[in-house]
Each structure stands twice: as C-alpha cells, then as structure tokens.
Amino acid sequence: MMDKNYWITETPIEPNDCIKKVARNEAGAVNTFIGTVREFTKDKRTLYLEYQAYVPMAEKKLAQIGEEIEQKWGDANTAIVHRIGRLEIADIAVVIAVSTPHRADAFEASRYAIERIKEIVPIWKKEHWEDGTKWIGDQKENKSYDKKIPSEEEMRDD
C-alpha cells in the first residue's frame, strides 16, 4: 500500500487502499467514490482510454484538494488515487475516500473532490473510440489536442 494519501499509479487501483488510509474511530462515515471507464459517451463507443499526467504536479494538486476539503469540512480525512496508462472498459480510473464524523459531509466532500480533480489536476486522457482517437486536454473536456499530446509546457501548472 502507498505510504501517502495522494498518488498517481500505473497499476490497477485497489479501493480498500484508500479506505484504510481514512478509516478512524472518530469517523461516522467513509464515503468512497470510484470512477470507472465507461463504454459509451454521447453515443460514441470507447474501446479503451489512455491517461497521462505530469505526476509531481498531479500529486501536489491532489494533496491541495485534500487540504481544501479539510478547510471546508473541518474534521475530514481524504485519500485520492488516480491511475494513468491504458485502461480498459470498467477499469477503475480514480478512487476518492473521505471520512468525516457525519455522512452528509463525507458525501459533499467526495463530490467536491472529483469536481476539483477535473478542474485543477494535470491529467489528460486519450479516447480510443471505434472511429478514431482524440486527446482530451482537460477532464471537463473543454480543450482537445487533435493530433498530439500536450507539450510539457502545457502539462505544467503554475
């Protein structure tokens, strides 16, 4: 099991690794979000995905999200792992585990975490559809790179 609470991995994710990092006696709830690779997006069939990341910055941004959650919800413990490389349909791409004394905070903080991942963490995905491929520049799919992956400068943040 990884020794830190926020990490990027090239190997399959085990959700219990995140849960174990946040489970504690003070927590009345541990909410776990598991993001998986879906087969269809807007009627386009995905064959598989590739994720790439600027790993040092991605892990730093995941930790920032954990700090933001602690500031917003107080007594919260968070662990987040995101996978990179080739992922098949139904593979786990991301796991977020948040423990809090009360369940409402755990649900809200988990939702907050996945939205912030899509906003600030430098992770890019390449969609391999039945009819071609396309790099997606951000996880909210607002930017694409038609014929290339992002340059190293585009991958850096701050």
Image (cartoon, rainbow, N blue to C red):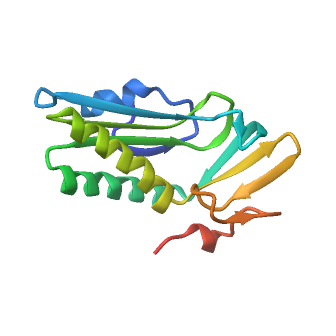
Q: Quadrant of the N terminus?
A: top left
Horizontally, residue 145 falls left or right of residue 156, namely right
Residue at x 61% of width, y 29% of height? 91
Horizontally, residue 4 falls left or right of residue 75, namely right
Foreground of the two, 3 or 91: 91
Foreground of the two, 44 or 27: 44
Horizontally, residue 6 falls left or right of residue 147, namely left
On the image, the x and y values in percent for residue 3 come to: 34, 38
On the image, the x and y values in percent for residue 101 come to: 14, 34
Q: Is residue 59 visible?
A: no
Residue at x 71% of width, y 63% of height? 144
Residue 137, located in which quarter of the rendered image? bottom right
Does 125 sit above or below residue 77? below
On the image, the x and y values in percent for residue 150 come to: 69, 66
Residue at the far right in the pictured view: 131
Horizontally, residue 57 falls left or right of residue 141, namely left
Q: Quadrant of the C terminus?
A: bottom left
Does 89 sit above or below residue 41? above
